[in-house]
Image (cartoon, grey):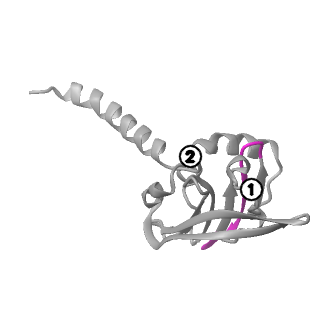
Amino acid sequence: MTSFRSQLFLLPIGLLLALLGASAQAGLGRPLSDAAQDGQPVAQVQRYAAQAASGATATTASVQTQTVQTAQGVTVTEYANAAGTVFAITWKGPFKPDLQQLLGSYFAPYIQAANTQTQQLNLSMVQGQNIVVHSAGRMRGFLGVAWVPTLVPAGFDPSRLQP
């Protein structure tokens, strides 16, 4: 029989382990197959070739997408490169999504870059060395896009992503 004090001691440890486990599984840079952890899938994985003209030659980037809907009603589309690694996300919905979950290990660089740049009330454009996040919103209408420049496949233009 465990005492009440030992249960109180173990509870925070269990919560901490659960939080660490959840945050390690989410975010940019993870496999697209983990996208369902961000919400309920609403569109199957789609594969397509994105073409971009680069000078005299055109390059083709193989891109996969999956769309999920969070419990709060936010639609999130995750974009993955040919290796299946998520390099960009877009979101649109009545609430701000959990950026810490969606950005994963890139959340800290995002916060660091955001603290050094001027933000507007309804518009945020953060460009760090490892992360780019553009978001806008007002009550019941939030949208945004984020990408990791080093993970974007050659030939893909992330500035064309639409929430």
- Badge 2 element: helix
- Where does the image place residue 26, in percent across and percent down from the top left? 49, 49
Residue 79 belongs to magenta span = no
- Where does the image place residue 108, in percent across and percent down from the top left? 64, 40
- Badge 1 element: loop
Give above or below for 117 relative to 95: above
Pick whichever of labels 2 and 1 is earlier in the sequence. 2
Q: Name the residue under label 2.
A: 104
Q: Toward which corner of the image does residue 123 lie, by quadrant?
A: bottom right
Q: Mark 1 points at which residue?
A: 154
- Where does the image place residue 161, in percent across and percent down from the top left? 71, 68
Residue stretch in magenta: 128-142
Q: Which residue lies furthest to the right in this view?
A: 55
Residue visible at 83% across and 50% down in the picture:
118
Residue visible at 22% across and 30% down in the picture:
7
Question: Position of 145 compared to 38: left or right?
Answer: right
Q: Which amino acid does label 1 sit on?
A: Ala
Residue visible at 73% across and 50% down in the picture:
149
State the separation of the CA atoms marked 2 and 1.
23 Å
- Where does the image place residue 153, in percent across and percent down from the top left? 70, 55
Q: Toward which corner of the image does residue 112 lie, by quadrant?
A: top right
